Amino acid sequence: MAPEESKYTARFIETALDCSSAQHALSYPHPKQRWLIRKHLRSLLADYPSFSPSTDSFTHDDGTTVRLLRAVGDLRFPVGAVPLAIWLPENYPYAPPLVFVSVNPTSPRIHRAHPFVDPSSGLTTAAYLRNWAFPGCNLTGLVRSLAHIFALDHPFADCNFSVAGQIKASQPDLASRNEAMDRLAGMLHYDLAALTAETETETESLQIKREELRDREDIIASLVIGLEHECRSLTDKVTELKKQAEELEGWLMMRLRASGSPGTCNDDGDGGFEAADEESEMVIQNLAGDRAVEDVVCELGKAIEEEGEAVSFGAYMRQVRALSREQFWHRDSVLRLRGPAMLDYWHG
């Protein structure tokens, strides 16, 4: 800082602190407090000439407005400067200053994940401020601590953070306790942010899988209902077929009893028809086998037409080939026993 500028700055601080005008008087009532403020500000401006003092009105969160001193300036880094406004509250230096990263529509935006700077207001927190204790803490030490923090992690999102690599972690003796705490807090902050993002991603993935399982559960429930309905339908069909078989058996028994032919049937209905000789018996058996094969082929055809999923086409073709061979054998046997006249029976 040039000598004239230094004199002007000193004069400004003196005038501001000694002003007794009701409109411009600062909110520092005690002479000793004003003397400490004067000392701390001069020390800060001597070590960091880029800062300059000013006065302005400050509104607290409870709505009260006071007139305070502040130091405004830039912390310069190779990747970009960080503009700061350091306000000295009414009970400074017994309470820590209020530090803001100055933001305006033309300045870069503060990245939202920064561990020490609020992205909306620019309010800055650090271990030095949290552990503020007079007389061990002052403005020069605060700015030095902030310079260390922003060198490690620049607050503006558009800046390159490569400057952090210039600070060597292999020299812990150069870092104060507060700087070490800030470094640790920053590492924990980013680790926690990464873990939170990973957890959110995993939660979303599990939610998607949960929805898929619910859809599969609905499909399986629908299939089970369909199978239960089909099972009931098949049970009803079996019951109906048993009833028809019993009616047919009763009819056959009644007809046999009415014919009065002893020995032509037994209790279970077998032997309802009796051949005149052995050759006729063979013809009847082969004709019955032919008709049985014909019925089975017909039922298989219905099954593949009506319930294509129940009988595969391959299985259907294998069964038809096997039944065709058996039917051919039956018809061949009948032709050998009765001659070509039986062709009219099949083609009629």
Image (cartoon, rainbow, N blue to C red):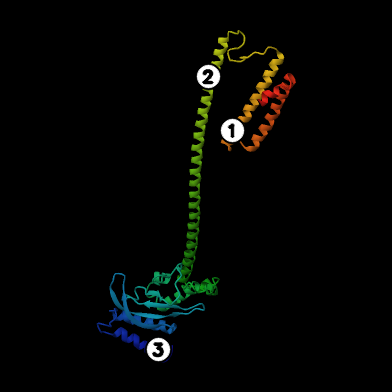
Q: Nearer the viewer, residue 100 or 309?
A: 309
SS of the residue under disc 1: helix
Image coordinates for residue 181, horizontal then vertical, percent: 46, 68
Amino acid on which disc 3 is placed = Ser
Based on the displayed image, in which of its 4 quarters is residue 58 positioned?
A: bottom left
Q: Are marks 1 and 2 in contact (CB under 8 Å)?
A: no
Circle 2: element type: helix
**In the visual, does 247 lie left or right of 323?**
left
Q: Secondary structure at mark 3?
A: helix
Q: Amino acid at mark 2?
A: Glu
For disc 1, the marked residue is 302
Name the mark on residue 247.
Answer: 2
Residue under label 3? 6
x, y percentage for residue 337?
73, 19
Q: Viewer-nearest of labels 2 and 3?
A: 2
Task: Say if 311 sits above or below 106 in the image.
Answer: above
Residue 64 appears in the picture as rendered = yes
Residue furthest toward the bottom?
4
Instruction: Measuring from the top left, give residue 132's x and y in whole percent.
Output: 39, 72
Residue depicted at x 47% and y 59%: 196
Q: Which numbered disc flags the more N-terminal residue, 2 or 3?
A: 3
Q: Is residue 185 left or right of residue 13?
A: right
**Relative to 26, is 268 above or below?**
above
Please identify the quarter of the rendering in which residue 144 is found.
bottom left
Does residue 326 appear to the left or right of 13 in the view shown? right
Q: Could you tell me how far apart the alpha carbons at marks 3 and 1 are, in whole angstroms? A: 108 Å
Number of residues whose C-alpha sits closer than 10 Å to that of mark 2, classed few (under 14), some (14–19) or many (20 or more): few
Residue at horizontal 61 percent and vertical 32 percent from the top: 300
Q: Quadrant of residue 276?
A: top right
**Within-10-Å neighbours for mark 1: few <14, some 14–19, many 20+:** few
